[in-house]
Amino acid sequence: MSKQVKETKRGHEPAKVALHPRNVKFDWSKLPLVWIPGEVFASHYVNVLHLLLPEGERWFVKVFSEILPLIEDDQLREDVIGFIGQEGVHAAAHQEVQDYFTDNGLDVRPFAAEIEALFRKILGDRDLTGRAKEEWLIERAAIIAGLEHLTAVLGNWVLNSPALDAAGADETMLDLLRWHGAEEVEHRNVAYDVFQHVDGRYSRRVRSYLLGGTALLVLWWRGAGYLMKNDPTESDPAKRPKAGLIKLIDAERRGLVPGVVRIGWATWKFFLPNYDPSAEGSTAQAVSYLAKSPAALRADAIAERQIAESQIAEGQ
């Protein structure tokens, strides 16, 4: 990792960070389904991420693996390889939470199946060849650039969300969200740089964002409703609370969720012709969190031990 820094309007930022996956592990055995005490809506609103991200991140990996041959810039190619590695670990980490939900009475498989169909069928490979195949690949890369803008926005939010700590949110869940959020901020330029490299048309950027962003928001809201409707912590289905716009506005006001105001402002920034993804969040802050994240520290310790064991084995 480079130790060079440059002065920016956000302070001292690393000039370049070498992207690499961190093989994190989390213990979910004590996770309550409502992991923000007393906040059913806020907990499940954020829990939707565990329904959307596993399949979505795997789709990111597939598309960017396929687009690698179109990337002629060596540095960008290296960044994409690091991006692919990080997104693969993200998918696995959120899949563990999704599986935990189902194993503990909150069966999310029907909703997850819809997400799988979206990414594998509607947004999956088509029987295309030649230029049409390449255009469909670039179109999906453009959608990912827009979605990655939103994930960077969410990452920046969760890294700066003291209200979650004050509310007594589960520490393991917070570490997952902040580790993931920090890596989203860390690699926030990559997807946009790829799109600029292979196409870069402003009209396509806006169109693909509207498609991808709208779909994400609809699925997010539906997912929150699904989780609240099926939450087993209330045994009587008739008494289970429902998702509502007033609840979202209230939870956003109290800093417990990223809501309509933040997403609306993020959308406006993405539509600006001079949009710069590096302006969303701070690499220095992201790297700082990754240096103290319990899960990331465990991953680094395991990696260092494996390297040491390998060196010992080679020396024998």
Image (spheres, helix red, strand yellow):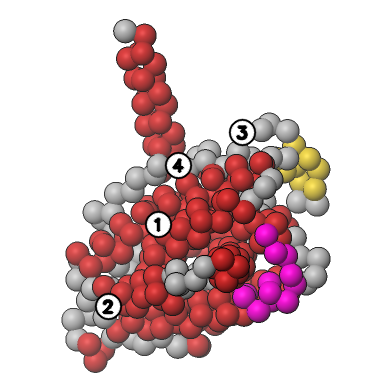
**Mark 4 residue crowding within 10 angstroms, few (<14) / some (14–19) / many (20+):** many
The answer to which of marks 4 and 3 sits earlier in the sequence is: 3
For image coordinates 34% across by 45% down, the residue present is 25
**Mark 1 residue crowding within 10 angstroms, few (<14) / some (14–19) / many (20+):** many
Residue ID for mark 4: 22
Q: Of helix, strand and loop, which one carries label 3? A: loop
- Residue 198, how many percent across, how many down? 67, 60
> What's the magenta region?
198-209
Q: Please say if the residues under marks 3 and 1 sit with CB atoms less than 8 Å apart.
A: no
Residue ID for mark 1: 91
Residue ID for mark 3: 1
State the image quarter where residue 75 is shown. top right
The answer to which of marks 4 and 2 sits earlier in the sequence is: 4
Q: Nearer the viewer, residue 9 or 119?
A: 119
Q: Of helix, strand and loop, which one carries label 1? A: helix
Q: Is residue 202 magenta?
A: yes
